């Protein structure tokens, strides 16, 4: 931070207009002062090197200040979002041995914990652990429009001192460098609790060295630095939760290059893009999907000439992308194309250039303008990016870099590069700097002999090794031993292969997601689901069929497309779209969603009775999955309109589908 202050002191570091009690707009110089004030706050509360402090809150500039202050005094932040269930937040506080201090989002979360504790017959907030007993001090990141008298009343009711973080920052002088401990790369920086699909979350221990690797990692020197790297003064708009390691690492990466972070929300995202015109963003596929669906819906509502132009320029853009990859040797296969083939493709790209210039001006520029008009790169992470989305954004001319990793890897193991992108479904690029990736036989279990790599092109389980890999799970040696072998290889649980032509890693699924049919055939659902997502009707999909004779697709349909195809009236389609959007909002709570549930479920039941709709869907599915083997073809569809979302427990907070939860919800109906 001190070096950044010297080099970029007068440049904007953070802008938060929505998520704090007041607008926070600070330079790197001011941020350095605030972080050292934060360190002094925690020093005054007795936090020392080796202590853990729970931060239970969502995105905001204050969150980052608290996190850096804790780390500066040698502590480690144990983090989770405020929207998690109260029981899970209690578990995290207790399991992490938080040192008697709870940093909370604000009065709403405080009330939520207090109310739940009372229901469970627990004292105070129900936050306690063996080492420090009950919570001794509460710090609220935000007032959330509450008066000081309201907060004082809560303090008296709970019998626990409550402070507002902004007031504490204003009341102290910055911590001096000589009062701060020396930190090593091996010191613990944070404990990130995974949002796993089953059971209690595991606490991923990440050291300062793990995070430093992510700030400086690269695959190799870039051909086009200005396109591949952030430049001081550039901007990112932040939408994802900062407690999630993907967002936090990306913010640190941007800050380390003198760029500014602008905090946004789902509700203000569109306006913030237009106002701040970012060059960089990190988004999960679910957000990219919603943007793409919105654009495609607008195209579908256009006049006949508009629809015709979109169709023509989609075709020419796809052809340009295909032949550009061939010309540059970016293909999936055993070998690169010959010189003659590459020259032919270059000629085709040149012939298509005038049409694509017109297409960009008339069609795709509208999509780029929707992102603010200055966007250089979107980083996609958190889960696999469906091939249909890859194609859509590639046609638009928007540069998407897919990163691959896990919380346990801080998170990146590999990523694509903007100057040599191999854009094919499942491709996640080359390993990061100082990182090894190995594909092994799924039956090859860890032992005293190092597991051998399979030949390139052969699918298997993905292992990773490098400076970003965690030392282990907090207070869980058994899980650590299961995840990391004696040679330092971390078992990702993902399935993939190395492209022999380029060396890129291509993911093919999750080992635990494999569907085994009654005839013994093993099916990896992810590539098939990616193909199915090309259907204009389908917003989300999950395959099922474990121990059965055939595959069934649970498909979440798009109300707009159902209206366009005549399966719904326009008025009902609008109501269903609004209900869908409400449930998809990460801030939505169950009580708010009840009316939407009823509306969507009622319409789903009626749509399932439409033989014509089912026929249309199966025709789509057959068309988009014809390249798969016979037993990988989908034989039936189960239609729903209710999305897989956080509020109904079918989506994790990192936007991954909870397959077990979806099956729990629909298994009886599917078998009925």
Image (tube, rainbow, N blue to C red):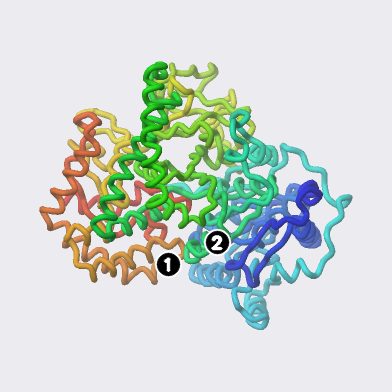
Asked if residue 326 can be seen in this view, the reply is yes
Asked if residue 201 can be seen in this view, the reply is no
Which x, y percent locates residue 345?
38, 26
Which element carries disc 1, helix, strand or loop? Answer: loop
The first of marks 1 and 2 along the sequence is 2
User: In the rendering, which numbered label is found on residue 589?
Assistant: 1
Q: Is residue 71 left or right of residue 407?
A: right
User: In the rendering, which numbered label is found on residue 264?
Assistant: 2
Q: Is residue 432 left or right of residue 119?
A: right
Which element carries disc 2, helix, strand or loop? Answer: loop
Residue farthest along the left direction in this orientation: 611
Which x, y percent locates residue 604?
21, 60
Task: Write down the quadrant of residue 558 in the picture.
Answer: bottom left
Residue drawn where x is 40% and y is 53% of the image? 651
Q: Nearer the viewer, residue 453 or 232?
A: 232
Residue drawn where x is 58% and y is 68% of the image? 18
Label 1: few (<14), some (14–19) or many (≥20) C-alpha neighbours in 10 Å: some
Q: Nearer the viewer, residue 20 or 481?
A: 20
Which x, y percent locates residue 177?
86, 51
Task: Write down the quadrant of residue 260 in the picture.
Answer: bottom right
Label 2: few (<14), some (14–19) or many (≥20) C-alpha neighbours in 10 Å: many
Q: Is residue 170 above or below residue 312?
A: below
Q: Nearer the viewer, mark 1 or mark 2?
A: 2
Q: Is residue 240 above or below residue 424?
A: below
């Amino acid at each position: 931070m001190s070096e950044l202050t010297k080099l970029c002191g007068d440049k904007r570091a953070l802008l938060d207009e929505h998520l704090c009690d007041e607008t926070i707009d600070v330079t790197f110089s001011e941020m350095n002062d605030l972080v050292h004030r934060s360190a002094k706050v925690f020093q005054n509360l007795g936090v020392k090197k080796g202590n853990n402090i729970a931060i239970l809150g969502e995105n905001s500039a204050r969150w980052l200040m608290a996190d850096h202050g804790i780390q500066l005094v040698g502590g480690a932040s144990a983090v989770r979002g405020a929207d998690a269930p109260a029981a899970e937040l209690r578990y995290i506080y207790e399991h992490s041995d938080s040192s008697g201090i709870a940093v909370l989002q604000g009065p709403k979360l405080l009330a939520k914990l207090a109310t739940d504790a009372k229901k469970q017959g627990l004292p105070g907030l129900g936050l306690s652990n063996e080492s420090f007993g009950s919570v001794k001090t509460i710090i609220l990141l935000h007032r959330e429009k509450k008066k000081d008298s309201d907060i004082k009343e809560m303090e008296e009711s709970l019998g626990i001192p409550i402070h507002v973080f902004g007031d504490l920052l204003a009341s102290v002088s910055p911590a001096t460098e000589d009062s701060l401990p020396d930190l090593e790369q091996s010191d613990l920086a944070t404990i990130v609790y995974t949002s796993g699909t089953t059971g209690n979350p595991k606490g991923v221990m990440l050291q300062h060295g793990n995070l430093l690797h992510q700030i400086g990692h690269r695959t190799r020197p870039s051909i086009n630095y200005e396109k591949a790297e952030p430049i001081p003064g550039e901007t990112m708009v932040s939408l994802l939760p900062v407690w999630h390691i993907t967002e936090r690492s990306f913010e640190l990466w941007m800050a380390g290059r003198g760029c500014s972070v602008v905090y946004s929300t789902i509700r203000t995202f569109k306006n913030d893009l237009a106002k701040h015109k970012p060059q960089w963003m990190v988004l999960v596929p679910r957000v990219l999907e919603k943007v793409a669906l919105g654009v495609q819906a607008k195209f579908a509502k256009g006049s006949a000439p508009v629809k015709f132009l979109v169709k023509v320029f989609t075709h020419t853009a796809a052809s340009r992308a295909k032949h550009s990859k061939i010309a540059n040797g970016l293909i999936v296969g055993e070998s690169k194309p010959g010189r003659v083939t590459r020259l032919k493709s270059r000629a085709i790209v040149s012939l298509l250039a005038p049409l694509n210039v017109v297409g960009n001006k008339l069609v795709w520029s509208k999509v780029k303008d929707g992102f603010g008009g200055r966007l250089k790169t979107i980083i996609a992470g958190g889960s696999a990016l469906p091939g249909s989305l890859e194609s859509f954004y590639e046609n638009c001319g928007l540069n998407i870099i897919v990163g691959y990793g896990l919380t346990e890897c801080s998170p990146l193991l590999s990523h694509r590069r903007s100057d040599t992108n191999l854009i094919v479904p499942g491709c996640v690029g080359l390993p990061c700097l100082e990182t090894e990736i190995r594909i092994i036989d799924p039956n090859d279990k860890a032992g005293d002999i190092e597991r051998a790599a399979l030949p390139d092109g052969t699918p298997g389980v993905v292992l990773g090794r490098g400076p970003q890999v965690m030392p282990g799970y907090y207070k869980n040696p058994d899980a650590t031993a299961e995840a990391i072998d004696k040679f330092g290889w971390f078992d990702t649980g993902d399935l993939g292969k190395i492209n022999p032509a380029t060396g890129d890693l291509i993911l093919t699924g999750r080992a635990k997601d494999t569907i085994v049919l009654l005839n013994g055939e093993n099916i990896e659902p992810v590539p098939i689901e990616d193909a199915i997502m090309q259907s204009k009707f389908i917003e989300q999909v999950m395959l099922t069929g474990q121990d059965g004779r055939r595959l069934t697709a649970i498909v979440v349909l798009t109300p707009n497309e159902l209206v366009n195809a005549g399966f719904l009236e326009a008025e009902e389609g609008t109501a269903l779209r609004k209900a869908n959007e409400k449930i998809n909002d990460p801030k939505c709570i169950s009580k708010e969603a009840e009316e939407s549930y009823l509306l969507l479920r009622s319409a789903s039941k009626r749509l399932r009775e439409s033989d014509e709709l089912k026929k249309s869907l199966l025709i789509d599915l057959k068309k988009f999955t014809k390249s798969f083997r016979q037993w990988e073809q989908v034989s039936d569809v189960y239609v729903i309109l209710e999305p897989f979302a956080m509020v109904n427990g079918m989506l994790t907070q990192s936007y991954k589908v909870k397959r077990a939860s979806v099956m729990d919800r629909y298994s009886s109906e599917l078998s009925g």
